[in-house]
Image (spheres, grey):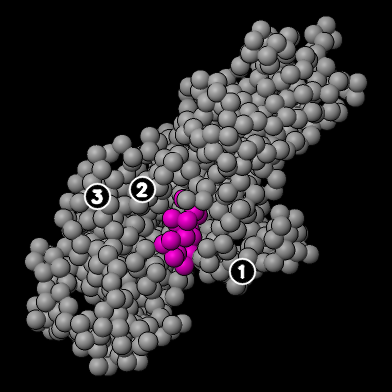
């Protein structure tokens, strides 16, 4: 049999190796991780996002039992310049009520006995069409509104009432206790007062967000990300970072502060970003799951694939705008790390987080072509960060996966500027991952460190098969073995909503009711939960074809061994553990094994194959010493001295 000998004491590797990549693609944010249940809450959807959309998309006027009235859009007295449109409900005859209904993102999922938080901004209006229409004054009578959850056939599922007075925008909040369950319900805001009322930022959240956060995240999705034990979270992308043309670059300042003051914008993936999940929420989520934030800012150039430039490629910010842009990035560091007494630290503190977030990593650019426009701007930003924010480690980029096999062109700027870390991306077939599972073994250690920021094995029909998951696992053993040079890695993309999936494969599929982890998810989870900070030597003698790594988790003193067998025959193994840093008594063993074509169900409707997930067992050390690595398997052993 093959003999595997594990030897201590081990050499240091990155303790931030395995993390996650979050991008708002496939409705991952609005309609996904961000728990807001109302779609187009601020009446700012536009035909720029989708030609069949407008500011009233996803809203419907409802008139009950003889009610007469209508809805209009207005721009005259916006809540904030970043949030221009609002709706005006004009009620001529109350009857059983006149209002607005919203069916959320593919229905509002309502669960009996759950509480929902309602909030909106309202301003009663006096309607006099002889004098130019809509006036707000203190004589306007109070306006009564009902917020209701109801089934599509009108069956009530819970409600609460409000009375709005005054002549200014006012934030109104309340709660609805759901009386019944309906996965496909809708929200109705019904006026019971004749006259007008201006409405904006009409919002509905389940109260059981992740960690109970206000303006929070959908609990099951956030838990599935936390379950990966990521050491970092990269956000907000991806191509979303550099955007569809310069005006569409993701600017962090537009995404912080009260939600009604944030600047929503079109998403490069063809829909709307409310930015309700903005920089504050990303940083808070990182803190909640014990991961380091790894934000990526645009390198002052747009995506080379921007439709905006008519295929002409990258656009660069004009040079005269660069000083202000660089200041914006420096301000981000102050917002994250500065004391509450600093200008931007005060903005963070006002949002409820006086303590600094402790930002260490900052990505500049995403997969940009390394053109002269890019190089010039990247160099200016990099230089400013080195001088003004020495606590920050800059992550640069080496562009998209090269068409040939030569990465050197992409690495040119990294070599010249000695960028601390650079971001490499690969979306390749499973065979590529196996063939390149030695890529970093002979890597020049004097160059930049590597962040494998996006990778996924693309199998036939872009299915998330066990074959693809094992190819990634094999590759990840080399990332561990080379954890002195590869310091971070993240699978991409992370989330995809059924019915809105623009890119395959993804790590986790979901709908409004449930989360469907792929087999690849379990590979990431096993590596994330069993990461180490020291690499142990591993001798393999006899038959090979296996991919292996051994690490020590100094915090627990436990040694972890990972064995990937992508072949179609099993391997008998003898483990020589005599030289472990501390003697082991037993091992916890996880095995992920099956048909290489196996996939996990990605929706409730799919004729459900059984879910393939790791099997867990505990073994006495004598048994673990004689092990079989089954055909098509990943085995993870965690040795404990107790
Ligand atoms: O992960 C999907 C996309 O792939 C990312 O947005 C981009 O960086 C890459 O091309």
- The quadrant of the image that shows the N terminus is bottom left
Confirm or reject: label 2 Cβ below 8 Å from ligand 1: no
Q: For residue 472, what is the image quadrant?
A: bottom left
Q: For residue 592, what is the image quadrant?
A: bottom left
Q: Is residue 573 above or below residue 230?
A: below
Dot in front, 3 or 2: 3
Which SS class for mark 1?
loop
Q: Residues within 10 Å of mark 3 (few under 14, many from 20)?
A: few
Q: For residue 161, what is the image quadrant?
A: top right
Q: Which residues are magenta?
A: 221-236
Q: What residue is pinned by disc 1? A: 358
As for residue 233 lying within the magenta part, the answer is: yes
Q: Is residue 119 above or below residue 505?
A: above
Which SS class for mark 3?
loop
Confirm or reject: label 1 Cβ below 8 Å from ligand 1: no
Question: Is residue 388 rendered to the left or right of residue 152?
Answer: right
Q: What residue is pinned by disc 3? A: 610
Q: Which of 143/25 is in front? A: 143
Q: Residue drawn 71% across and 54% down?
A: 351
Disc assigned to residue 516: 2
Disc assigned to residue 197: none
First in sequence, mark 3 or 2: give its number: 2
First in sequence, mark 2 or 1: give its number: 1
First in sequence, mark 1 or 3: give its number: 1
Confirm or reject: label 3 Cβ below 8 Å from ligand 1: no
């Amino acid at each position: 049999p093959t003999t595997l000998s594990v030897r201590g004491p081990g050499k240091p590797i990155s303790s931030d190796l395995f993390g996650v990549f979050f991008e708002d693609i496939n409705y991952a944010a609005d309609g996904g991780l961000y728990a807001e249940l109302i779609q187009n809450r601020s009446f700012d959807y536009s035909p720029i996002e989708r030609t069949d959309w407008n500011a009233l998309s996803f809203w419907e006027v409802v008139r009950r039992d003889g009610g007469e009235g209508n809805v209009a859009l207005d721009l005259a007295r916006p809540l904030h310049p970043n949030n221009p449109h609002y709706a005006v409900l004009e009620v001529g005859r109350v009857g059983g009520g006149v209002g607005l209904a919203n069916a959320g993102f593919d229905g509002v999922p309502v669960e009996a006995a759950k509480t929902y938080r309602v909030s909106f901004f309202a301003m009663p209006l006096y309607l006099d069409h002889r004098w130019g229409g809509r006036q707000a004054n203190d004589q306007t009578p109070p306006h009564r509104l009902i917020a209701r959850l109801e089934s599509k056939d009108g069956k009530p599922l819970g409600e609460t009432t409000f009375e709005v007075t005054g002549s200014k925008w006012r934030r109104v909040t309340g709660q609805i206790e759901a009386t019944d369950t309906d996965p496909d319900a809708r929200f109705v805001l019904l006026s019971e007062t004749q006259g007008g009322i201006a409405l904006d930022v009409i919002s509905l959240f389940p109260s059981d967000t992740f960690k109970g956060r206000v303006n929070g995240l959908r609990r099951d999705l956030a838990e599935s990300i936390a379950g990966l034990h990521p050491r970092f979270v990269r956000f907000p992308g991806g191509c979303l970072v550099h955007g569809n043309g310069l005006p569409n670059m993701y600017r962090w300042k537009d995404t912080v502060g009260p939600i009604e003051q944030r600047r929503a914008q079109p998403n490069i993936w063809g829909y709307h970003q409310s930015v309700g999940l903005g920089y504050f929420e990303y940083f808070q989520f990182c803190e909640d799951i014990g991961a380091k934030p790894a934000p990526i800012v645009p390198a002052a150039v747009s995506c080379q694939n921007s439709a905006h430039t008519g295929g002409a490629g990258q656009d660069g910010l004009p040079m005269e705008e660069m000083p202000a842009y660089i200041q914006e990035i420096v301000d981000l560091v102050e917002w994250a790390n500065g004391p509450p007494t600093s200008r931007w630290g005060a903005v963070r503190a006002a949002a409820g987080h006086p303590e600094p977030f402790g930002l260490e990593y900052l990505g500049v650019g995403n997969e940009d072509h390394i053109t002269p426009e890019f190089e010039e701007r990247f160099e200016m930003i990099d230089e400013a960060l080195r001088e003004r924010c020495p606590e920050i480690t800059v992550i640069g980029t080496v562009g998209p996966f090269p068409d040939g096999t030569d990465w050197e062109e992409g690495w040119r700027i990294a070599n010249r500027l000695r960028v601390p870390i650079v971001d490499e991306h690969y979306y390749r077939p499973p065979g590529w991952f196996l063939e390149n599972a030695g890529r970093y073994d002979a890597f020049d250690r004097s160059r930049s460190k590597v962040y494998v920021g996006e990778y996924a094995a693309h199998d036939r029909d872009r299915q998330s098969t066990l074959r693809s998951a094992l190819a990634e696992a094999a590759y990840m053993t080399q990332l561990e073995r080379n954890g002195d040079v590869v310091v971070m890695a993240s699978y991409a993309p992370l989330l995809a909503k059924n019915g809105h999936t623009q890119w395959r494969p993804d790590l986790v599929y979901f709908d409004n009711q449930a989360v469907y982890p792929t087999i690849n998810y379990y590979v990431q989870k096993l590596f994330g939960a069993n990461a180490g900070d020291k690499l142990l030597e591993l001798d393999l003698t006899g038959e090979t074809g296996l991919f292996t790594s051994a690490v020590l988790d100094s915090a627990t003193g436990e040694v972890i061994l990972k064995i990937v067998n992508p072949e179609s025959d099993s391997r008998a193994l003898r483990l020589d553990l005599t030289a472990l840093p501390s003697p082991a008594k037993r091992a916890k063993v996880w095995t992920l094994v099956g048909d290489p074509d196996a996939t996990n169900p990605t929706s409730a409707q799919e004729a459900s194959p059984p879910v393939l997930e790791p099997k867990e067992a505990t073994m006495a050390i004598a048994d673990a010493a004689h092990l079989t690595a089954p055909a098509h398997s990943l085995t993870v052993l965690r040795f404990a001295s107790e």
